[in-house]
Amino acid sequence: MVKFKFRLQPLLNIKKQLEDSAKNELGKAVQKLEQEKEKGRVLLRHREKYINSLREKTSSVARVEELRNYTMYISSLAKKVEDQNKNIKEANDVVDKYREELIKIVKERKMLEKLREKKLNEYLIEMSKDEQKRMDEIVSYKYSDYEVK
């Protein structure tokens, strides 16, 4: 009896490896996105802290130079927050790219697996037919042998 062999099995194996690799890359990209988001949250908290400090200083007696320094620092923090938001968007775009790539690879792998399953079913049906044919031949041979005697 001939063993089932799927001729596209090497390609299916490669697709599985590519899927694992894409999952790893997606995981790294998601982790990077979360790090960027956390940096953004830290910057926002820091900025809010200085805004509150500036409000306290303006309600009490403070030097003009000190108020100007606070204002400049808050402005620089606003610029950093803006830059960080760009970094977050870029990281999000990378995550989306890897997610789309993973979806494509999974679809291709599933298609190959369905084809493999179809070919296996065809093989099993063919083997069943061959087995039935052999059984019929055996029965026929025994019957003819029985009639001859």
Image: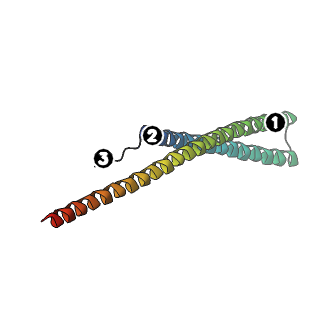
Extreme residue in the left direction? 149
* Residue at numbered disc 1: 75
Numbered disc in front, either 3 or 2: 3
Mark 3 and mark 2: Cα distance apart in space = 17 Å
* Residue at numbered disc 3: 2
Which callout, 3 or 2, points at the residue further toward the start of the chain? 3
Numbered disc in front, either 3 or 1: 3
Q: Is the residue marked by circle 2 packed among few (<14), some (14-19), or many (20+) residues within 10 Å?
A: few
Mark 2 and mark 1: Cα distance apart in space = 60 Å
- Residue 59 spot, x, y in % from top left: 87, 49
Q: Residue 78, relative to residue 116: is it above or below?
A: above
Q: Residue at x 82, y 44 (%)?
A: 54
Q: Secondary structure at mark 3?
A: loop
Contact (Cβ within 8 Å) of mark 2 with mark 1: no
Quadrant where the C terminus sits is bottom left
Q: Residue type at mark 3?
A: Val
Is residue 23 shown left or right of residue 59? left
Is residue 122 shown left or right of residue 83? left
* Residue at numbered disc 2: 8
Q: Is the residue marked by circle 1 packed among few (<14), some (14-19), or many (20+) residues within 10 Å?
A: few
Is residue 36 shown left or right of residue 28? right
